Amino acid sequence: MINHQKKRRVVVTGLGIASSIGTSLTVFKQNLFNGVCGIGPVTLFDTSGYTGSPGAQIPDAALQAAFSPRELTRCSRCDLLGLLAAKELLVDSEEVFRDCPREKIGVIMGGGAGGMLTWERHRRPLWLGKKSRPAALLSAACGTLADRFANTYGLGGLRTTIATACSSSATAIGYGFDLIRSGSQEMVLAAGSEAFSELTFSGFNSLRVVDPEYCKPFDKNRQGLSLGEGAAILILEEYERAVRHGKTLYAEVLGYAVNSDAYHMTAPHPEGAGMMKVMERALKNAEIAPEAVDYINAHGTATKANDQAETLAIKRLFGEHKARRLAVSSTKSMVGHCLGAAGIVEGLATVLALAGQKAPPTIHYQTPDPACDLDYVPNQARSLNMQIALSNSFAFGGNNTSVVFRRVEKS
Amino acid sequence: MSAIVFTGMGIISPLGIGREAFWENCCAAQHGFCKIKAFDTTRMRCDVAALPEHFQPGQYMPAAEYRKMSRLSRMATAASIEAMKESGLKLESMDRDRIGIVLGTAFGSSSHLDEFYLSFLKDGPRGAQPFLFPETVQNTAASHVAIYHKIPGPNVTFCQNELSAESALAYAINLLEQDLVDVVLTGGAEEVSFTQFECFHALGALNPIKINEGDVIKPRLRGGHILGEGAGVLVLEREEFARKRGARVYGRMGACVLQGGQAVIGHYAREGRALGRVMEQALEQAGLKAREVDQLDLGANFSGELEDLEYSRIKQMFENIRRVTPLKYLLGECSGSSSLRIAAGLLSLKEQRRLPTLDVEILKASGSHDLIWEPAQTGLTRNVLMTFATYGGGVGAVVLRKVEA
C-alpha cells in the first residue's frame, strides 16, 4: 500500500506542448503572453452546415514535419498530437529520466475523445457499405496514448488514463501528484491530448453552445465556446530528486481536489456549488488559505452558464473583496476548449504564469457582463507578483477539478 | 493507517443478476455466453457474447430515471443501487462529500456514441441528436451514479482498456488512504454494442464461434475474445469505519499494484517481466509468500497472448501449480467491468469456498476443447491473488484477504 504519511514535495520539471498557438514551448509562451488567437477555420473535415465552424486547429504541416508517413498512417491524430508535445521535451529522454528506475516512472493521461477521428474514418465507409482500413482502429481507444508514451520512452510505472471529459487531464496532474507525494512513483509523465473529430464538433454544435465566430470568455456578448485541439505534458518529480539532478523547477504542485456537482449531465450547478467546493478542497489539500491565492486560470469556456457559475463560485469562496483583487483569466480565449487536454494545457499555462510572473490575458474581451464582474485580465497579459495559482477544470457530468501550484523561487 | 475492506457489491453480470445468482453460477462454472440478438452479426466471424440477458433497469429505478441513460449507465447505476443497499450505508446520515465514485470503462457508452454519429451521418450537423451526445462521454456512468444518489464527492472515471476497473480500484484506495473519503463506490461497467463488436471483428480479435439455437457453445482456445458486458460496483471503506457502523465485510484489500510492460499497440506485453514484478510486489505488500496463495484467478481471455504471458509467470512463481481460475472463460472479456472478477474473489473469501478451476495446462492448449472445470469446493480460503493485463502493455495484480472474525 502507498505511504501517504510521507508527503514529499512535488515539482514540475518539464513542459511539452502542441497547440494551435505553438507546437514548441518557446512559441507557445510567446503567443500566450502576447494574446495570440489560435481560433480559425477548421480544415480537417467538412464544416459546412455547422453554426459554429471555427476552431483552434493544429496545422497538419506541424504533424507532417514531425512524423514519418508510416507513423501518420498508423497513429490516431490524438496520439500524434501527444507525441508531438513530447518531441521537444523528450528529445533527450535519457537525460530527463536520468537515474530513475523506469518502473518508478508513471504515465497518467487525461483523455477525451481519443482516436475518435480514426473510428469515424472506419465507421463512415462501413455505413456507406464501402471498405475501410481496420488496422488503424488499434489506435482508436482512449488509453492508447498512455501505452505509446510508455512504450516509446520505456516507462514501466503505473500507467492509466483518466476520462472525465473536460477535467480529465487536470485530474491526471492531481493523480500524478498523489503518486509522487506518497512515494509510489519517483516521476510521472502527466499528459492530455485531444484531436478534433466530427463527433465532438457535431455534438457541441447540436447543444448550441459553440460561438459562430470565436469564443469570448466572460464577455457580455459571449455566445459559447470554440473547440480546440492540443496536447500537453508536465513532468512531475519529487523535489529533492529534481534539485539533486539540477533540473529546472518550473513550479511546485501543492495539491488538488476532484468532486461532482451531482446535479446535471451538461449544465453546471447554477450557483457554482461544486465549483466552489472543489476550489476550497484543493486549497485545503494544499494547506493554503484562500487569501494567499494570486491568480486563477479559469475554466472560462465562454458559455453563458459556465462563466457566470464560475464567477459566482470564486466570489463565494474568496469573498467579494478578495475575488475582485484576483487576476482571473481564460486561456481558452486563445487555444479554444481542448476538452480532454484542456486541464493540462491550462495547467501548463498556469505554470508558465508563475514562472514568468505574468498573468496570461483573456482575449476577445470587449463588453463587461454584470454577472461576470471580476478582473479577467482583459486582452493584455499583465506582470504580477504571484506565488499561488489555481487552475480550474469543469466537465460534462459535473466533474470538477482544481489544481494548486506555487512559484518556485530561483536559488 | 487502517486496513481497507469491501462491504458491499452490486452485480449485473452474464453469470447472473445480483450477488446470489452470480455466485451460484460462478460455483457451478456456468458460462454466460449466448447468441447476440441485439444487432446483426451475419457478416461477422462471431455471433456470441457474454450478456446479462435478463437485466431490467426497471427493477432498480423508475423509468424517468433511466430513460435517457445508455445501457452502460443503466447497468452501472443499477449495480450501484444494489451495492449501496447491500452495504447498509445510510446516505441520509452520512457526509456525502466524503463518498467517492470511481469507475472504469474501456469503451464507454459505445451504443449511444454510434447512434449519435449515425444521426449526424444521415442528416448532417443539423440532424445530430443533442439528447444522445451527453451519453457519449466516458464519464457518463459515474456521473449518473452521482446524480442518482446525490453524491457530490470525488468522482473519477478510468479508461485503460482491460485495466480500467483495476485503475479505478487503485485510485479508490488512494482516496481512502489519504482520508479524503470514508467510502468509495468503485468498479466498472462495459456494454457490448454493434460498433464495439464490429471493431473487434474488423481487427480479427473475436473468437470464431457461430451458433444456432440450442447449440453447445464451445469457444476456441487461443481463438480470440468473447466479449462480455455487465457492471460490478464494490463498496470500499476503511476497516475502522466499517467496524464502527457494524458493516458486513467480504474481504480485505491486501494489495493492488499496477505497472506497465513493453508492448506493441494492440498486443499484450511482449515478455512477462512486468507481470512477474507486479505479482511479486503485490504479495510483498500483502506480506505473503507465494505458498500462502490459496486461489489464483487469472485474466486469461482466449486471446492466446495473455495465456502465454500468465503461464510463463505463474510457472516461475508457483512451482507446483496445477489448477487456476481463468474466470473470463465463463464471464467473457468484460473489459472495463472486470471488477466482477474481484467480486467473485471476495465471495470466495466470504463463503470460504474456492472458485472452480481448470488444469493450468489448458493455457497452452489450442483449438476446440471441452473445458473440464473442477467445481467450486469448500475449503480454507485466506488469500486470493488475481492477475490483470491489457493490450498495450498494462499489467496489474490484486491480493484479496480473508477478514478474521
Image (cartoon, grey):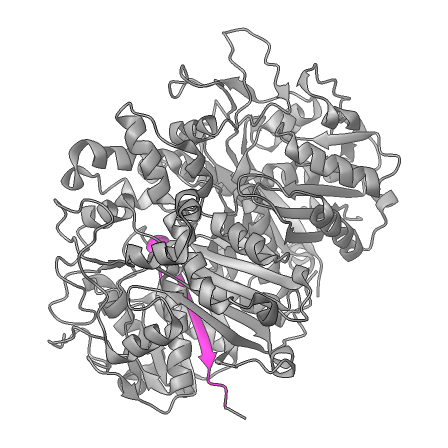
Which residue appears at 45% of the width and 57% of the height? A83
Where residue A371 appears, as percent x and y from the top left, is 17, 73
Q: Is residue A404 magenta?
A: yes
In this rendered view, identify the residue nearer to me: B252 or B241: B252
Q: Is residue B158 visible?
A: no
Q: Is residue A206 visible?
A: yes
Queried whether the magenta region covers residue B66, the answer comes back as no
The residue at 26%/83% (across/down) is: A381
Left or right: B318, with A244 as reference point: right
Residue A26 at x, y percent in the picture = 37, 76
Q: Residue B380, percent across and down?
A: 84, 37
Q: Percent x, y for residue B85?
A: 54, 42
State which quadrant residue B127 falls in. Answer: top left
Q: Camera-side residue: A365 or A352?
A: A352
The stretch of residues the image draws in magenta is A394-409
Relative to B103, is B303 on the left or the right?
A: right
Using the rendered view, name the quadrant where residue A398 is placed: bottom left
Instruction: Say which quarter of the image contains residue B197.
Output: top left
Q: Is residue B17 above or below residue A74?
A: above
Above or below, A79 against A248 in this view is: above
Q: How many marks?
A: 0
Q: Residue at x 33, y 90 (%)?
A: A384
Residue B405 placement, left or right of B102 = right
Q: Is residue B291 above or below residue B320?
A: below
Q: Give whichever of B245, A305 is nearer the camera.
A: A305
Dividing the image into 4 quarters, which one contains the N terminus of chain B?
bottom right
